[in-house]
Image (cartoon, helix red, strand yellow):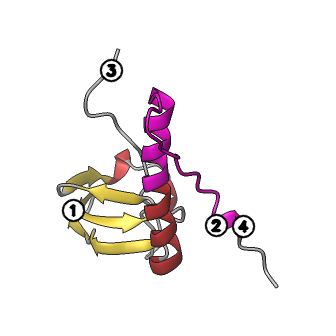
Amino acid sequence: MSKNTDFFPIERNRYFYGKLLTVQDFDLEQRYGRQKGQLLNRLALGAGVVCGLGVSASDDSTLLIESGMALDYQGRMVVVEEPLLRKLQMLEGQEELLGHDTAYLCLQYAETDLVPVN
């Protein structure tokens, strides 16, 4: 029998009347919701493209990547909000593409702050 305890390390905040809420409480609440969503994504949907993200050659040295969304292996959403044009020479590992008919383009999850906080 396999152990599934690694799938459920989710800690939930326990609220009660009169509880003094701190930054840590709000962080825990946000983390709980995020981890539940990521767990569901990972177990029910798996990793891969959900929608969009088509790739085509604009010319011999430029790729057009359509907007869309994918899930990484941790269940996090990787979102490309608008189409991207990328020159091949700007992509890491592009020098290894010479003479090959097939290549893989990978996306990576990166969280960015919208409002800077001092």
Q: Is residue 5 left or right of residue 49?
A: right
Q: Position of residue 24 (x, y in %)?
A: 51, 31
Cα distance between the residues tagged 3 and 4: 36 Å
Look at label 2 and name its amino acid. Phe
Q: Which element is circle 4 on? A: helix
Q: Which mark is residue 67?
A: 1
User: Which residues make up the magenta segment?
Assistant: 6-33
- Say which element carries label 2: helix
- Sequence-earlier tag: 4 or 1: 4
- In the image, which is nearer the foreground, mark 4 or mark 1? 4
* Precedes in sequence: disc 3 or disc 4: 4
Please say whether residue 74 is one of the residues in the magenta stretch.
no
Badge 3 is on which residue?
Answer: 117
Gap in Å between the C-alphas at discs 1 and 3? 28 Å
Q: Of the residues shown, which amino acid type is indicated by label 3?
A: Val
Which residue is disc 2 drawn over?
7
- Residue at 30% from the left image edge and 57% from the top image edge: 79
Question: Given contact means CB atoms under 8 Å apart, are the residues at marks 4 and 2 in contact?
Answer: yes
- Asked if disc 4 and disc 1 are in contact, CB closer than 8 Å, the reply is no
Classify mark 1: helix, strand or loop: loop
Question: Is 19 a magenta residue?
Answer: yes
